[in-house]
Image (cartoon, rainbow, N blue to C red):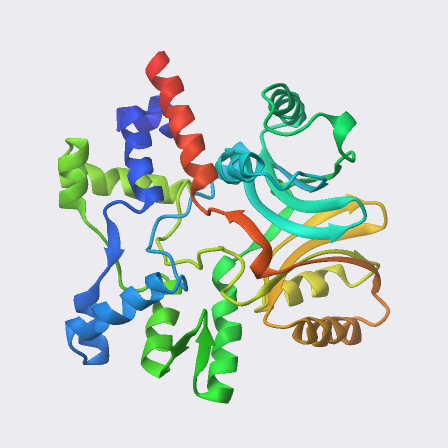
Amino acid sequence: MFFINYMSVLDDELNLRLLRYLVSGSGVSVNIRAIARKYKIHRATAKRKIKSFYDYKILNPPFYPFPQLYKEYPLLILVKADMPRTSEVIDFLKDDSHIFAAFSCMEGPYNTFLIEFFRDLESYHSWREQIVHDEKIPTRENRAAADANIFSNNLTFKYNPNCYVDDLKKEFESKENIILNNLEIDKLSFDILHDLTKGRFIQRNDSFLSRELDMDRKTIKHRVNILMEKEIIDKPKCFFPNLFIPPDYNLVVSLIEVKSRYIEFKKYIVFHNNISRAQEVSTGRYNYLIFSAFRTIEHFFDRGREIIDRFPESIGDISNTILSSKMIHTIKPQKLSLSWIERRLWEVKQR
């Protein structure tokens, strides 16, 4: 218990090495035997179902989410930028440890929409200067100035990337089957998908981790429990490959002006199955930032009308940025988390 009482959990090298495995999904897997037993199917059938989810990019293999990232990077920055369409720039967008997601867009002089995370304004400024200096992107003289909006992750009141599975469930129940990324999902497949996104039938191989990390299984279990209790990691699940955008859905980033009934509005958002992330903001007239996703633009407008009809006197101006799932440059759910863990591990080793 010494390391818990007298030093930060995230200053401990063994904890960081363990985190690297858990957040990457190494030693974490789907329990095929348990699925086969629940649904009374052969293990080969269950295994084939799981493999189809991965092959068709419907789900990623399971891993432990790292909510600590939003404490380490409290700044969320949404950027509309003018970027050249070169392989070098695309590689930069995919590899940079602060860019969570990048989309193609068409809005004024801008062709790229970026979602970025930073520790503070100083680090954001230094990063921008450095990537120009390193010629990762062209100088300002050769492109339109970026339009950046800065928000606080500390004001987030909803974060549930897998909420969309309940929207898919409604669609499935009305049609009795759905197609995602050209894969037809039958009832058995959907039930298994639903379980995995809720964190059911996920197992951790402590024997594997024990060998890899050279610590006994009891110690691993104890350390994982501490990491969970301190909310550094969360319950392992399977997530959509693009995290808060299910296959064949379109992302909508909305700034909303809410004039009254704030508590009711927030409660409505928390239980909305098309909204994965929401937070309070203060940007011009707008006081809420919402990330939602929809199968079709018509579906988006229908659900938008529902909100306006439910809060007719409360909703003011709305600014929507619609981003197609077909125009994603990169969304890597674990990239930023693993980059932060590696950097922290390096810092600890230097002490």
Image quadrant occupied by the C terminus = top left
Where's residue 166, x and y in %? 49, 72
Image quadrant occupied by the N terminus = top left
Q: Is residue 198 visible?
A: no
Give above or below for 34 relative to 72: below
- The residue shown at (29%, 31%) is 17
144 or 231, nearer to the observer:
144
83 or 289, nearer to the observer:
83
Q: In this rendering, would 327 be left or right of 147? A: left
Q: In this rendering, would 80 be left or right of 4? A: right
The quarter holding residue 131 reads top right
Where's residue 306, x and y in %? 73, 76
The quarter holding residue 127 reads top right
Q: In this rendering, would 258 be left or right of 48? A: right
Where's residue 318, x and y in %? 80, 59
Give above or below for 145 relative to 133: below
1 or 94, nearer to the observer:
94
- The residue shown at (40%, 36%) is 338
